[in-house]
Structure formats: C-alpha cells, structure tokens
Image (cartoon, rainbow, N blue to C red):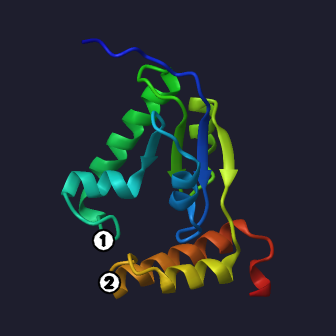
Amino acid sequence: METENKTTGQVYIIYGPPGAGKTTEVQRRMKEGDLVVDLDYICAALSLGDIHKDHTRILGAAMRVRDFIIDAIGRRTIPFDNAYIITTKNEYEIYKQTGGKMIEINPGLQTVLKQIENDPSSGDDTFRNNRVKAALEYYRKNDKYYKRF
C-alpha cells in the first residue's frame, strides 16, 4: 500500500532555551497527522533511553537523522499535515531549507530556571546542571536584557 505524500500544512521551527516549554507548546498545538522533529526524542529513540539523559556519545548519529528528516520536510518528500521542528537555536538555515515559520518560546530566564528546577523529568543532577548552563548561555547570547538578571 502506497502512502500519499500529503503536505498541506505549515512548517514551524520552534526555538528557545532549554526548559522554556517548547515541547509542551508543540504537544498543545499538534494534531494527528502532524510531524514533530525533536533531537531529544531522536536520541531517546536511537538509544531506547530516556529523553533527559546525556546523549553525547550518540549525538552525531542523532543529528544526521534529524538533518535527514528536515531535508525531507523541506523537499516535501514525506507526508505530514503540519511539521514542528524543535530546536534551542534560531536556526536560519532550517528556515531557508523548509520555508517554515519561526516561533520563539521564551518565558524569560527566571521562569526557565524554575521550570528546569521543578521538572521531575529533568534527569539526574548532571543533566539538570547542563540544562541550566545551556539556558544561561542562550540568554547570554540572545537576550539583550540578560544583564539585568
């Protein structure tokens, strides 16, 4: 049975710091038939593990899988209603490749730090600390108001 390549919807590139609620926002918006590309979940699938673990050893393979899927989305060679690409960076290259709509999820540094601290799925202390460091780095690079915190 051949699958119809139905790509009637929009591509959304959802970006923001770790702990901002990007995946939660996508889960709230998505409907059956939508495609979600999330590096955390790709890593978990490749390792049959938890999404909130250190996947450094398989990150290269996961990035290749992610890039392959994003390329297919950009070329419209796989079926989807809407596609959501979740990332921690404002990735202009993905925008150019897919024609997607960029949406930043940014509740602010203090909220992000609280959400990471209170998230029971944040994994062990090392993983949680790495998420905090990555969030601080995101705001250092991207938020002109960072210095006020």
Q: Which amino acid does the dot numbered 1 rest on? A: Lys
Q: Position of residue 119 (x, y in %)?
A: 46, 80
Residue situated furthest front in the rendering:
32
In which image quadrant can residue 108 be found?
Answer: bottom right
Q: Is residue 137 above or below residue 86?
A: below
Judging depth in this view, the residue of 46 and 138 nearest the camera is: 46
The residue to which callout 2 is attached is: 124
Judging depth in this view, the residue of 33 and 95 nearest the camera is: 33
Identify the secondary structure beneath mark 2.
Answer: loop
The residue to which callout 1 is attached is: 53
The answer to whether mark 1 and mark 2 are in CB contact below 8 A is yes
Residue situated furthest left in the rendering:
48
Q: Is residue 25 above or below residue 97?
A: below
Of callouts 1 and 2, the N-terminal one:
1
Q: Position of residue 137 (x, y in %)?
A: 59, 74
Locate the N terminus and report the quarter of the image it occupies.
Answer: top left
In which image quadrant can residue 92 be found?
Answer: top right
Q: Which amino acid does the dot numbered 2 rest on? A: Asp
Q: Residues within 10 Å of mark 1 (few under 14, many from 20)?
A: some
